[in-house]
Amino acid sequence: MVAPTTSKKARTGVPGLDDILSGGLSEGRVFLLEGNPGTGKTTIALRFLLEGAAAGEKGLYVTLSETEDELREGALSHGLIIDENIDVYELVPPESLLDADQQQSLLYSSDLELGETTKAIFETFERLQPKRVVLDSLSEIRLLAQGSLRYRRQILALKHYFAKRNATVLLLDDLTSDVLDKTVHSVVHGVIKLEELAPNYGSERRRLRIVKYRGQAFRGGYHDFIIQTGGVVAFPRLVALEHRKQFTRDRLSSGIGEFDDLLGGGLERGSSCLVLGPAGTGKTTFGLQFVVSAIRRGEKAAIFVFDEELGLLFDRTRAIGIDLEKMRDEGNLHIEQVDAAELSPGEFAHRVRERVDSANLRTVIIDSLNGYQASMPEENALVLHMHELLQYLNRQGTTTILTVAQHGLVGDMKAPVDVTYLADTVVLLRYFEARGKVRRAVSVIKKRTGNHEDTIREFRITKNGLSLGQPLDEFQGVLRGVPTFVGKAEPLLALGVGDENS
């Protein structure tokens, strides 16, 4: 019986993986799932069989290295129950092979063992007639074969046998016997590679890649994934070009007239704004103005906080008239504490996308990119991740505010990563000293979507919120932190009792 040529897919049941595979695994084909021990191969294989069982397909798990009790116990730790639609066949060497008196003297024992192993697998398949098969693991067969040629012939024999019976097969390889052996890659229909990375600090990071998939387009590159209670969850790499929503690109007010004037009327919907400045200048406060304004318009917003504890943020913003906790409790604001040491960039992008899609969020704050960078081993990768995330949010009509803390307080300052070219609008905050007082100034140095003021304005954060003064057109050197007064008037804001640094 020859397997029919069909594009029908066997879904893996792993969230995100079927999207990466463009629907799942081609039915009636043999696939390789490889990765070092601990990368999640068994968990994915179990989900693959359970997904088939839910669709009425019988499954067979052939284990050569793990006992049935160990397999079932591992499944239960994820809340997975191997039911009657899945048979576990534990293939272990016969007792006689462990007895020194019974060892072969004229024939190599591996010849006998490999033949017996293959025969046992085929007999079990004929008896159960499963639709999905998992073989765990190829390392044992490779060791029994004791040679690349014999190993390849054995894999080809398994492939042709299962292909004639239209079974979808997942071969697991833990890469413990020969990491460089690519024999199976050329034989199987597709290859999924799992990797585990250990950063200098924080939990391990896992990622997967589709190395090969014959006759099928798939989502290329690396995709982050996690192992959690319930199984593996994969986060397909975000491709902004695949997502676009129709929306009106209107102009959004911050609720503060002087700030809107500085921005040339406000921020355009579906654009991104980067707020740069040293620590403590008020970057988060500027971003929150657009959150408050959006909620007043009846829209929903989200804040992803990397650097500040939420309780402290609630208390601090409440003191300036912004009650984030109330907004959250009323369902208008999603606010989330993000631990950069525990979260991969792919998972973070997935969380943002999930929130935007499910709640139709129109304003998003990421505070800050310094914390986001801590989750990235390479700066170039951070820029690429941010590019796709910002492009996606822009195409959804979501206005995004990013904050970046620059190194230093006055004088020459540098950001840990240059993303100014990614943002549509860049707002620069500065400290400056005047008459023995530390003051703050704000300017807009870039806006792609229209004109903006090229002036510098002083601002203050008081118990009544954010207030901006008139342009400091009689000062020079404000952005350097040490201005020179060249005018005759008194342009600075008067200090008030409620001022933050009065």
Image: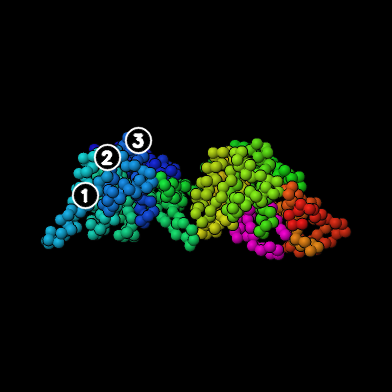
* Residue 7 place in picture, x, y as percent: 36, 38
Q: Does residue 407 belong to the magenta stretch?
A: yes
Viewport quadrant of the N terminus: top left
Q: CA distance from mark 3 to mark 1?
A: 28 Å
Using residue 9 as the reference point, say whether residue 401 is left or right of it: right
Q: In the rendered image, which residue does mark 1 sit on?
A: 118
Residue 130 - label: 2
Give whichever of 310, 368 is nearer the camera.
Answer: 310
Most extreme residue toward the top is: 56
- Name the secondary structure under disc 2: loop
Residue 448 - label: none
Give whichever of 501, 332 is nearer the camera.
Answer: 501
* Residue 132 place in picture, x, y as percent: 30, 41
Q: Does residue 78 belong to the magenta stretch?
A: no
Q: In the rendered image, which residue does mark 3 sit on?
A: 55
Q: In the image, what residue type sits under mark 1?
A: Thr
Which comes before the other along the chain, label 2 or label 1? 1
In the image, residue 4 above or below residue 373:
above
Q: Could you tell me if the residues under marks 2 and 1 are in contact, i.e. CB atoms within 8 Å?
A: no
- Name the secondary structure under disc 3: loop
Count of numbered badges drawn on the protein: 3
Q: In the image, what residue type sits under mark 3?
A: Ala
Q: State which region is magenta.
A: 402-431
Look at 80% across and 51% down and name the residue there: 470
Which comes before the other along the chain, label 3 or label 1? 3
